[in-house]
Image (spheres, coloured by chain):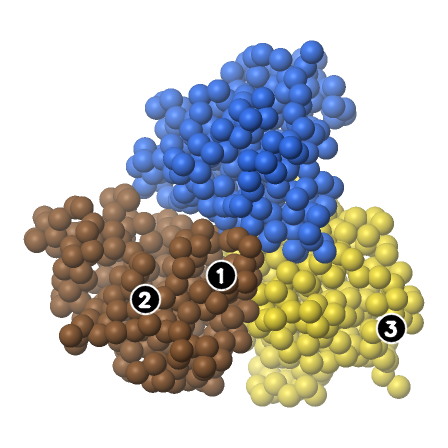
Chain colours: A blue, B yellow, C brown
Amino acid sequence: MEKRLWDHVQRVRQQSPLVQNITNFVVMNNTANALLAVGASPIMAHADGELTDMVGVCQSLVINIGTLDNQWLESMLQASATAHRSGKPWILDPVGAGATRYRDNAVSRLLALRPTVVRGNASEILALAKANSGATKGVDSRATSGEALDAARYIQQRYGSVVCISGEMDIVVGEGPLVYIRNGDPLMTKVTGLGCSATAIIGAFIAVSSDTVEAVSAAMGLLGVCGELAVAVSAGPGSLQVNLLDKLYNITEEEFVTRVRISHEA
Amino acid sequence: MEKRLWDHVQRVRQQSPLVQNITNFVVMNNTANALLAVGASPIMAHADGELTDMVGVCQSLVINIGTLDNQWLESMLQASATAHRSGKPWILDPVGAGATRYRDNAVSRLLALRPTVVRGNASEILALAKANSGATKGVDSRATSGEALDAARYIQQRYGSVVCISGEMDIVVGEGPLVYIRNGDPLMTKVTGLGCSATAIIGAFIAVSSDTVEAVSAAMGLLGVCGELAVAVSAGPGSLQVNLLDKLYNITEEEFVTRVRISHEA
Amino acid sequence: MEKRLWDHVQRVRQQSPLVQNITNFVVMNNTANALLAVGASPIMAHADGELTDMVGVCQSLVINIGTLDNQWLESMLQASATAHRSGKPWILDPVGAGATRYRDNAVSRLLALRPTVVRGNASEILALAKANSGATKGVDSRATSGEALDAARYIQQRYGSVVCISGEMDIVVGEGPLVYIRNGDPLMTKVTGLGCSATAIIGAFIAVSSDTVEAVSAAMGLLGVCGELAVAVSAGPGSLQVNLLDKLYNITEEEFVTRVRISHEA
């Protein structure tokens, strides 16, 4: 299995997919650098006059609502509708879902365009499900990991999306058995936007694979393993950000397969 | 006194205040990372549809006019009005005040919402006072440090804001005696946006303290001391930016209290 | 010749020109840091209410269309028209020209304002010429280096711009003999926005020199040499970005003149 995940890493390096991103201002630079480091080719564009063309030339699309406003939301909707129509894989990162009604409305509209993957933390996934299930159909407001899992299953069944709940342990929810990834380091939460990097890297991986659950698992495993290796040589979050990009670029198969901790639901 | 300032540093680490930022595109990433490094929780949002909600859940607000335009100014006014109404501490960074009439008009409107703190360099503070004093009531156009101090006192008295004039020596102007902080290094001016980081860090400190002058002094002392320690291990401005984030994250009480150089007006 | 190029580097350090930038969200931070590292003073502003004032106080203007939209395009047009009218040097970076019709229309409008310099890769320069030559007047759609050179000559003759085609070998196309610069390292393509940094650095160099071809050559040589020296001490693209800023700041005359590889058309 570890070896199969590595094949995904290799495929991105070899095929260098073009990934179109509409993401937030805070992380645009990191995101582009993370995509370059794993071997993908990032594009960042958001003008309504060119989005259809841009999505057309790309192999996948990343939508991240971090610094959302009305103009950018329209761009996100246009781009994801284009991806949806043309059967192009796309991923939604519902940053801050649950924090405001404004965000909940936005993610509901995006979710209706059936993202190939949704990646968020437990509370964001829960908020997403709540915002889309009318009242509270079986989804509660306190985010325990069990509830987030129920929420993920709900989204998966209703929209067909593979859902990745990221946290100390990442859980990938598809049609089959759950996948658990246990990599990463707490220091990674002290660097802004590594969740956004995870989303973008998944965006690159689903561009070159039709096994979405495995592609998501490989991407999360890669970031987690590289994070661990980078933390080991970092004095704090500043150097971690730098060392992580280096490691995403130069990680070897041996480093990856010996360190990635992946398992399946029994 | 040095020990008391360290208590502020500790309090931010322990309480991890939620700090809402409307800041400029150039520094958003650094600002978020600086806030994370000192132990705070940054939020960056600017849509008018959610600002009231966002300010509501945060402990403080940071407004920085760097890459200002009309849409963002409206967001800044809405957010700071919300903070003002609810008695929530907020800080204004009048980047580039004095450079254009457009900026001067913007800062005047923001100042009317009575920021808890204003932080800028001598010429920005002077421009701020000029823009708000009609003709030139005792404030002249050449920015000597004495004039900036007069300008700061004017703002303090008229708007009740604590004013921090940053420079080789930082001066904190409140109702009581002036506070002087003599830390930092000239290389810090070769990294973009460290003034903006100072403002954001102050934003975190005033979120968890009601002694604003002391909180501002602690924040400026922290950035200055960390800057000195980071410069000592840096080959240039690139590595300084990285090492500074590391040091903000891992500075110890001993490093801080032995190095911070703070004094009061006699 | 190498010595003469170094004089340009020195002049920027001594005169610290004020460079106004309207650039893309992805690279704003790097661009500002690159300008600071070479000794220039970056300004980033885009509001229509202040652009004329801002361009007025600056020594040069940088326009980069990376994350273009209609609002930003209007700002770019306003700023470059102001620069054009007042005879202030300005540089255009046509990021992604050729990718969409939207971009081609935008660069055509900007080109009509006669940039002092245009810098792009071969396919961008080719797209630029095509978009401005009606049908295909002698410019073909496949970007060979010969075709890009024809395209550059076309732009140079029609708009009077010095054109820099960057790539493994950079070519500077002015009225006189071509200049070739053979510096840099492939790892530089794995850091986002180093082309944008090149454009901004050229913007600083043309602010303090009237020999545009030489200023462009010096700027490209500087970035290439610093890139090589930085790669030599970097583990990957993360550390390269950091080390490059350090080297732009502390490169010595000897490092530069012994390493820069510049030649002229016979």
Based on the displayed image, in which of its 4 quarters is residue A251 positioned? Answer: top right
Label 2 and label 1: CA atoms lie apart by 16 Å
Name the amino acid type tagged 3: Thr
In this orientation, which residue lies closer to the viewer: C133 or A177? A177
Q: Position of residue A121 (x, y in %)?
A: 66, 31
Q: CA distance from mark 1 to mark 3?
A: 38 Å
**Relative depth, front residue between A264 and C55:** A264
Does residue B114 appear in the picture of this structure? no
Q: Amino acid at mark 1?
A: Val
User: Given the current orientation, which residue lies at the most extreme front position?
Assistant: A254
Q: Residue C157 has which mark?
A: none
Rendering quarter of residue B205:
bottom right
| B78 and A186: which is toward the camera | A186
Q: Residue at x 58, y 12 (%)?
A: A176
Residue A225 versus residue B126 in the image, above or below: above
The residue sitting at 84% across, 68% down in the picture is: B256
Q: Which mark is residue C182?
A: 2
- Badge 3: how crowded within 10 Å, few (<14), some, or many (20+)? few
In-front residue for pair A235/B45: A235
Q: Tell which tag, 3 or 2, sits nearer the viewer.
A: 2
Is residue C181 rendered to the left or right of residue A127? left
Q: Are marks 1 and 3 in contact (CB under 8 Å)?
A: no
Query: Residue A255 in the image: x percent, y percent?
Result: 61, 38
The residue to which callout 1 is attached is C231
Q: Position of residue A88 (x, y in %)?
A: 39, 26
Discs 3, 2 touching: Cβ within 8 Å: no
* Location of mark 3 (residue): B258
